[in-house]
Structures are given as structure tokens and as C-alpha cells.
Image (spheres, rainbow, N blue to C red):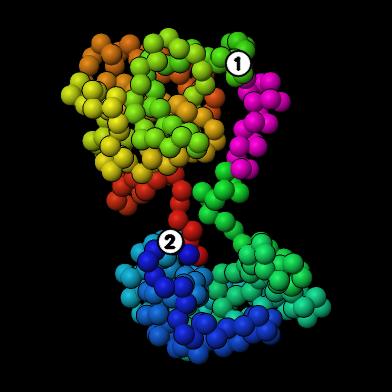
Amino acid sequence: MAQNSQSPLCSACKQATFEMLLAGFEHPLTYAQTLQSGKTCKLCRLMVCMYSKLQTHKSRYDVDKDYDLVSLQLAELPAVRRHFACGVLVERMELPPKHFQWEPDDILCKYDGQVQKGTFSDGATIQISAPEDSGYLLSERVLLREVETATSSRNFGMLRHWLNDCISTHDQCGRSISGEVFDDSGDGEALPSRLIDVGSLECATLPRLVETRNLRGRYFTLSHRWGDSLEYRTTKETLKEYKGVLPLDLMPQSFRDAMEVTRQLGFQYLWIDSICIIQDDEDDWRRESQQMGQIFERSCCTISAVDALDSDSNKDIGLFCSRCC
């Protein structure tokens, strides 16, 4: 579910047991009550979001994101069930169920005593998972390990392993388009004129803008969309301030996330165009922008903020999407 301030479960959902997931059960709340409860209860919200595939063309992620508004619409919408009969697609409209019914995968439950997946009243399939140290996972009654947040220490460790493996074994990744071999070991490549010093895991410091003065080393780059406007940028007026410290409270979330990724993967420097180029200095912008292709090509890793701008509000929501139902 999306990360927010809602409490985990309502009193009705707290009564659900593993045996009920195995056998199937009827949720005690009515459909209308479940819609209302979904504003604070994660499981009720999950039931509504997964069942909504029968009621709306909105994705389950959009239903979750705009739940307060969409749940009001769902209360008035019928469900549309589709099936093939003699090669013809048949659609049937019906009212939502009075109570949601959990229906587990019969084959797995009947023969293996396992709960792997199921549906609430024929909504979208729900996968069942358990924490890594759970007895249900260890006894293989639940087969899927719970998905961790993108920023968990385990996931950052996996990313470090992948990156180190790429640096040490992927010869083609260490070459330019022209075939030049990059120096990803030792002193590294010539650094761009300015970089953001994000510090390190061992020495937590506030990020600042630094002049590299022809130093050599390794760095990350961030590829991002500017959106309609980007107020957070280096200008002649802010240059001195940013060299002292970058004000994190004013920074777009994707910038902060990129700094954390850089730090977590063991690197000290990050290049972001709007910060590392003086935006209102024509000479600096012309000089540095001409180097952008080379800057990206020579970076050890490029972080792509492909989904950082919300499609509705155009607001920067960061590199890590909230977990939805």
C-alpha cells in the first residue's frame, strides 16, 4: 500500500488468520463500510483497489493515490464481469458484493497447505508474502518473501554488488562510443568543473557544491526532467551559498534521493546540471553545456529519474515510488 500516516489495520481485518487465508472467508464489513474503512485500514484499501479493476479503467495505483475521491465514485459504480462463451466475449453488469469474499488458489491450498495467491470477489490477484524471519516463510507455508522498501539496506547492498560487478567485469560498459577505455579504478577520470560533495556513510556531512580544479576521480550523474520550472538552481547569487552548504529543505526530492543513492553506493560526488552549471551565467552555461555529453559518458553511473514528476501535479515526488496495492 502507499506509504502514509494511516494505521495498519481496522479491528475487522485484525481478526483474519492464516487458516482463514487458507480456507477462504467472508469479510465482516459491508462493501460500503469497507470503502470508508479503506481511508485508514491498509487491508480494506487493498480489497477496494484490487476489486476496482471490475469497476473503472483507472489503474490500481491511481485508485490508491486518489483514494478519498475515487472511493466516492466507486460507491456508485457497478462491476463489469467478462467471460468468453462459444468464442464470444460476454459482459455482465452487477452490483458490488455485499461483503468481500477471499478466495485462495484452490490447488495450492488443497494439496500443499500453502497460501500463495488469491482474490477478493474475483478482483485482481493478490500475492501473499511474509517477512524473512517469519515461521510461515521458513516452513514454506508462504513461499514469497515480503517486498522490502527500495531504500532498505538489503537493496542498497544488492545495488553495490551489481555496480561493483559491472565495473570489474563489463568491459564494454567502460568504453566510450569511440572505443576509449575509461579509468574506473585508481585515480579515475578528469572530473567536471563542479560537483556536489555528498559526503560518505562514514562521515555524514551536509552536501555542498565544490570546484574540482582539474582533479581526477569518479562520480555519479543524475538525469532528470525539469518540469515546468525548477526554482532550485545555481545562479551567480546562490553560488557562494551553495559552496558552503546546499539547503536540503528547498531541494527537489529526486535530488535528495540521488544524493542518498550516491552516498549509499560508496561514492562522494554527484553531478546535476541545474546545480553544477551557473544557470544565469551565459559564458559558464555555454562552456559547461558543451561538455554535458562527455560528463554523462564518463560518469561511473547515471541515475535516471524516469518517474520523478507526478503526471497530474507535475510535482517532484522523488526516485522511489510509494508501494501501492
Give the residues in magenta.
Answer: 157-177
Task: Give the residue displayed 46% in from the left and 73% down from the top.
Answer: 8
Is label 2 in a helix, a strand or a loop?
Answer: loop
**Closest to the observer: 66 or 273?**
273
Within the image, what quadrant is residue 290 found in?
Answer: top left
Q: Which residue in the protein does label 1 denote?
A: 186
Task: Give the residue displayed 71% in from the left and 25% down from the top.
Answer: 169
In the image, residue 287 above or below residue 324? above
* Most distant residue in the front direction: 203
**Closest to the observer: 54 or 134?**
134
- From this viewpoint, is residue 222 visible? no
Tell which circle, 2 or 1, labels the residue nearer the N-terminal end. 2
Mark nearer the viewer, 2 or 1: 1
Amino acid on which disc 1 is placed: Gly
Within the image, what quadrant is residue 239 found in?
Answer: top left
Q: Which residue in the protein does label 2 denote?
A: 3
In the image, residue 162 above or below residue 314? above
Q: Position of residue 27 (x, y in %)?
A: 53, 86
Q: Position of residue 258 (x, y in %)?
A: 44, 37
Within the image, what quadrant is residue 129 found in?
Answer: bottom right
Asked whether, in this view, residue 46 is left or right of residue 147, the answer is left
